[in-house]
Amino acid sequence: MSALTEDQTGSGGRRANGTATTVENPPYPAVPRQAAAPGPTSAEPTPSTTATATATATATEEPASSATAPDKPAPSATVSAEPAPSTTPPEKPAPSATAPEEPAPGSPATGHTPHPPITAVTTELAHRTTETDVFPARWARISDTRFRFTAHWPAAHPFFGPVDVRHQDPMIVGETLRQASMVLAHAEFGAPPDTHFVMWDMTVDVDPTALLLADAAEPVEFDVVCSEIRRRGRGLRSMRTTMEFRRAGRFLARGTGSTGCTPPRAYRRLRAGRLNALNTPVPLLAGIAPQVAGRSRAEDVVLAPADRPGVWNLRVDTGHPVLFPRPNDHVPGMVLFEAARQAATAASGLRPFLPGTLTAEFTQYAELHSPCRIETEVIDDRPAEVTVRVAGRQDGASVFTASLTSPRPARVRSPS
């Protein structure tokens, strides 16, 4: 889950693979809670017990008052990165004893629980620069650790667009989870506006057959349970969010991820060597054919050819308006998630590749100025589905690993 920064622009006003001159996630004004029009509420949140996170994005914890290293450096997961080579990744915090709370009982006099106030999601809370890139729309607090969201997944989006003529992009689930986690961290758990976010892990299970373009106008409702909550004073140090998504009462997906929060001073200490070299242009490699990567537009391809089959180089376009809405001192986690999906598509030859299950684990920051190899292995190729394992390696070290499973489309028998 990568925090965001100021826009990076090149000649002619277009963002370019030139220089990134600011650190990620500059302070923005505190956002007051905004009341939205009341809407219908759904059933009591039910935490998913099947979605288990295996991804560990590098999280940057705040160093202690002494010169000790932070608990865990944080790669961008956003969904939202990776520690400097000289920094030993801190250990991931152990789960705390904080458990999700049950909603308060209804009024003894009426037997009904009053409707909770509804708050609108802003671009600042979701760490996006344009409203069209914000998918959670509003939320209500059910208890101290349970929340109910409404989201909109558009039929058309510049990046999270349709994968074929029938289906929405399953990757929108992970991006919604990433944004909602940051929203709650800020608005409900006290993370300051200038906090740097990462996700140590994320697992998403999707029913691709339910992600139909024909249903895109319907709002998506999802319940969130927050657990493993660790505090830093009155603010937040880390927590896990577990979400279940439904549309018109039909199950769509469930997911879980562990979010880390790093104060700017601790982040600057962790990334000092990299922040001082942000003026170096990032080479933009030629991408592979869009249809091989499962994309319709060449500008959305994040893979470049490498020296052997099943291996690609990461293509970093710092001018991409969705993947790099603001400059970053490392490769955002969203780019690495997309690289895993595109690599799985190319390695399997399955198009469309609709990840029904996606897990990812991040071990260090992916640096902008060093080649990152994306390696694949088809580990389970069955008639009904295919599973691909993807690994990112940079400077001889592992950056991330991921596993993606996609169902194969049913074969239609011709009439005899």
Image (tube, rainbow, N blue to C red):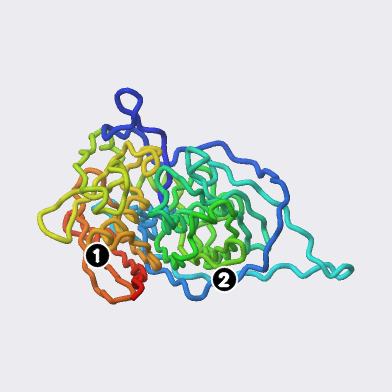
Asked whether the viewer can see residue 236, the reply is yes
Q: Is residue 367 left or right of residue 159?
A: left
Q: The disc labelled 1 sits on which kind of residue?
A: Ser
Residue 34, image x, y percentages: 67, 43
Residue at horizontal 27 percent and vertical 62 percent from the top:
344
Asked whether the viewer can see residue 80, the reply is no
- State yes or no: discs 1 and 2 in contact (Cβ < 8 Å): no
Q: Earlier in the sequence, mark 1 or mark 2?
A: 2
Q: Is residue 213 left or right of residue 282?
A: right
Is 211 or 59 nearer to us in this picture? 211
Q: The disc labelled 2 sits on which kind of residue?
A: Pro
Q: From this viewpoint, which residue is outermost toward the right?
A: 109
Is 96 or 77 nearer to us in this picture? 77
Mark 2, Cα crowd under 10 Å, few <14 / some 14-19 / many 20+, is many
Q: Is residue 407 above or below residue 238?
A: below
Tag 1, which secondary structure? helix
Residue 134, image x, y percentages: 51, 46
Reading the image, the residue beneath label 2 is: 47
Reading the image, the residue beneath label 1 is: 348
Q: Quadrant of the C terminus?
A: bottom left
Alpha carbon distance from label 1 to label 2: 33 Å
Disc number placed over residue 146 in the picture, else none? none
Labels 1, 2: front one: 1
Residue at horizontal 62 percent and vertical 50 percent from the top:
138
